[in-house]
Image (tube, helix red, strand yellow):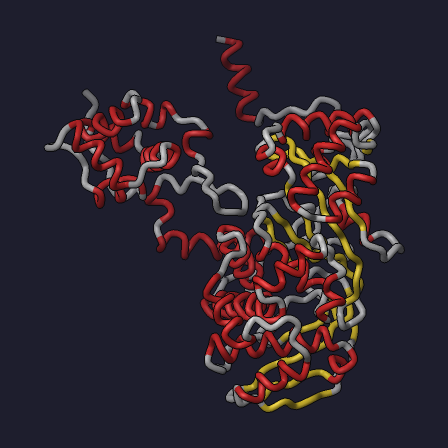
Amino acid sequence: MKSKANLIRQSHFLGTKIRNLRKRHNLTIEDLSSRCIKIDPEAAPSVSYISMIERGKRVPGREMLGIIASVFQKDVDWFLDDASTDAEITPAKSSAGGIRGMALEPGFLFDDHILQIAIPELLAQTGTTGRQFAHLLIRAHQEHHRNHFPDLERAAEEVGLKRLPLSVEDLLDIAKKLGLTIKWFNRAPKEVLDETGSYSNSTVRSFFDPPGTLYLNDLLKSEPWRLKYDLALHIGHCMLHNKDGLKSVLLAGKNQSHNGSADSAQSFEPSAQDILSAWRDFECSFFAGALLCPRVPFRQLLERNSYEVGVHKQIDVSASVVMRRMTAVSSYPHWHYFDAYPPGTLKAVYRGNGIPLPWGNMRLVEDPCQHWAVFRMINSDNPANSAQISVLETSDGPHIYCCESVKVEDMAGNPHVLCAGIDLNPVLDAQGRSGHDIAASLKQACVRGGGNAEIPAAMRQELISAAGILNIGWIRRGIDNPARVICSRGSACPRTPSCYPIAESPDTLSVMEKMQQAIRAEC
């Protein structure tokens, strides 16, 4: 019989395996405890003890582990390190959005104090600023919750009374009732060196001075859709944060809004102030969208207009607000949204379906796939909308995506591309079809066609049916265009010839694995 010490040394993934098994069988911790009590009332773990086991805080004895193993009809050794596989230790995917997580095992290495030490070092070594890390945290939280924040929705509805549209006068009246004094300033855009090392135009749009002064750029007077957004955002700050002074300056340009501290923006050590400011920026931005586009009337507007981006002109808001709100109000949860600046900077990202990023928003990548719609639109002189059907290999197999891209300019005159899209695999699966099989077939057709292909007639009907169910007009326009195979990075390009030079015979074995192979062959 193995000793307790040996069991502890083999238990690094034990908690993750138990948690994943429990979730895959749709059992709560209480359910699992009850099942264990049924097997052995004396030695069964309590609810709190199972929770500690799953979090790596406790290691059960072999007898207790045997009871848990009996519940799941597994051998005890399956739970130990020598029986682990990636599938067993990868967190089970719930209905939440975003990309898959990782197993935080062994648990003691992910202790709060260890992470507080390790994270700043990781950021410094990778060149990731504290502000970038803060925005990454917010994005992960947003994607995990599938852009669903009912408390922020309710707060916006209480102020705006679910009116659609709200005029500039309506918003100024709300601001006045909140005790805000409006002051106008004149500041033209100027060229600055941004954090990616490239030049772009930038200017201050607006900022809040406590206890109740709101400064607005004169340029907003000629662009009411932008003025409405800035007013809505600062109204959100007043409502959510009681007009305190912790509110970032709102900028036009590639730069993210910031709190005025250049040193803070370049620091590799995330401060509590950075993270709190990033969270408040997100809250106010979400509030502004919900105030300008209240959920129920806006969703009805989208349904009447088949989710066309052009509805932003009917209610006099920006295309960005409409596209971001689509991801929050649609009954279909599998959306993504990009706001991309040339040559390759993502100012905003949302991936409710976990789609890989076409490039990094921390820094430029050397092998971006130029066939993503946002890349093609950035490099095109045609400002028209672009609907595209794409097929992409992911960790979950091939997926079919459709997106609508719009080329616009920010208030400082910088061109950028807004892109809203959906994952079509889930709706195909819901129709009794295999989304993966259809995507694999479309990928093969695209590869045979050199990367692009007309969608086969039978598949067209499947996708047209999906477009009808979802009531999204730009899917139909995408179907009328050739489909494109895209990839997460150029090094994984499936096209022949490849868009980027690749090794003739790629080898996935590490140097150490090759050495081990050679030693085994010699012995």
Q: Can residue 110 be seen in this view?
A: yes
Dividing the picture into quadrants, the one containing residue 109 is top left
Q: Can residue 263 be seen in this view?
A: no
Q: Is residue 462 left or right of residue 32?
A: right
Q: In this view, does 374 lie above or below 241?
A: above
Q: In this view, does 387 lie above or below 71?
A: below
Q: Is residue 171 above or below residue 521?
A: below
Dividing the picture into quadrants, the one containing residue 319 is bottom right
**Between 475 and 64, which is closer to the camera in this rendering?**
475
Q: Is residue 259 above or below residue 91?
A: below
Q: How many labels does the image show?
A: 0
Q: In which quarter of the image is the N terminus?
A: top left
Residue at the image position 71 percent from the left and 69 percent from the top: 315
Q: Is residue 221 left or right of residue 88?
A: right
**Between 28 and 363, which is closer to the camera in this rendering?**
28
Residue at the image position 22 percent from the left and 32 percent from the top: 35
Whole-percent x, y for residue 90 in the image: 45, 35
Dividing the picture into quadrants, the one containing residue 372 is top right
Residue at the image position 56 percent from the left and 60 percent from the top: 135
Whole-percent x, y for residue 33 in the image: 22, 37
